Image: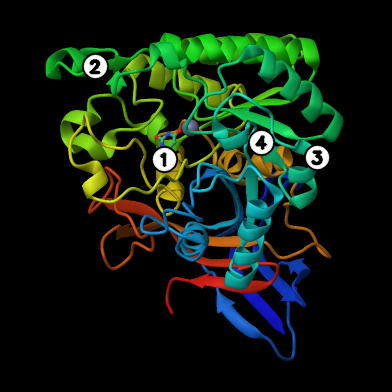
Amino acid sequence: MRILIKGGRILDPSQNLDLVGDLLIEDGKIAGIDKRIEVSYAKVFDANGLLICPSFVDMHVHLRDPGQTYKEDIESGSKCAVAGGFTTILCMPNTKPPIDSPEVAEYVIRKSKEVGLCQVLPAGAITKGRRGKELTDFYALKKAGCPALTDDGSPLMDSGLMERALRLAKQLDLLVMNHCEDDNLSKGHINEGYVSSLLGIAYRSPSAEDILVARDCILSYYTKGRIHIQHLSSKLSVDIIRFFKEKGAPVSCEVNPYHLLFDELELLESGANAKVNPPLRKEEDKQALLEGIKDGTIDCIATDHAPHTKREKASLESAMPGMIGLQTALPMCLELVRRGIISLEKLVYLLSLNSARLLGVERGIKVGKPANLVVFDPEREWILDEKTNLSKSQNTPLWGKVLKGMVVMTFWEGKMVYNAVS
Ligand code: DOR
Ligand code: ZN
């Protein structure tokens, strides 16, 4: 089967590729990239005015499967992923049961292969039951297909265990990820600031994040084990990571698009739909994150797609934290491009090439390589609503809002797994 995508702007900054032309896909691979390609038979798509980039890689997705499939499941989550331009997602282990054994990891991989829309990689838990007491069998989880380990949702509080985890992970070439918020300082619901005072709501302070970020960076510095800080949100944490990167510690980090575009005032607008852990913080934190993106301190953008039902989002204090984000990531990141904060090339690094590198996944537009591509219209406006949303949940401050930038087609290993027009 041959597919010819004609007249798009083909962009892969890792190879200085920026060409308006045609791209040919044959037998799942990229078979040609040129100003003009003529073939006698092929399914042809017109990509005039569209961008063609390496498909996106999301290191932080909650699929809720097994156990909470009323919020999302591997099939609905995969559909959201490809509609958002992602063909590799790392799903978090805070499922029921958690992904703390090879059996659950194998279940995720098996089911995602049956769905067949994209690559779903399970993140294994660092500790049994995500209870923070006893390490899981890292070797078995790696063998079952987990490239990374995290207890996400809960931080790993025990420094001794984290040190052992980093040493072991280094031997096995696994990435350790941590949700950094010290439990003792994060008992509240929203950021410590104007909104928590105004509404009289218990807060979780940025120091909760900063303390664990610093600890993990220190342990990574000494053990040389790779640590990845999840959903960075605080100003001081950006400085801490910058410092340890300069010292040569193998530290990486991600940021969620919501933390880049919203601050705590959004809670007054969107209520519980703007509640997330770590919380939306102050304008100065947001500015520091944007600086971190610009100077390379922050490695990638990850959505932290965290579906919850309407009942679970009833009030600020009772609500589960999290927002869905797979379908809104591209328009949100394009907003950063439109505001002149990042270039289109940088967007491709943040959403695709850097996260791929961290997970050891191949990405790039090269003849002979698998055709993992996203084709999008940076100008097209659309609304996330009942018609367009593919998640089982609706929890996002962007619900019903006009979004600019739309995925038109997504290809996974040469197969068209999403087409906005069909
Ligand atoms: O807001 C969040 N929601 N942060 C997390 O770390 C977990 C996630 C979830 O699982 O809903
Ligand atoms: Zn988390």
Give the residue number, with chain letter if any, for mark 4: 149
Chain-order first, disc 2 or disc 4: 4
Image coordinates for residue 258, horizontal then vertical, percent: 38, 35
* Disc 1 residue lies near ligand 1 with CB under 8 A: no
Q: Secondary structure at mark 3?
A: helix
- Compared with residue 205, is residue 45 higher up or lower down, i.e. above or below? below
Which amino acid, by three-letter code, is at mark 2? Ala
- Compared with residue 115, is residue 376 higher up or lower down, i.e. above or below? above
Q: Which residue does the image show at 63% across and 53% down from the upper left?
A: 104
The extreme right residue here reads: 171
Give the residue number, with chain letter if any, for mark 1: 338
Instruction: Give me the disc on residue 139.
Output: 3
- Cα distance, mark 1 to mark 3? 44 Å
Can the viewer see residue 133 in this picture? Answer: yes
Can the viewer see residue 362 in this picture? Answer: no
Dividing the picture into quadrants, the one containing residue 86 is: bottom right
- Cα distance, mark 2 to mark 3? 40 Å
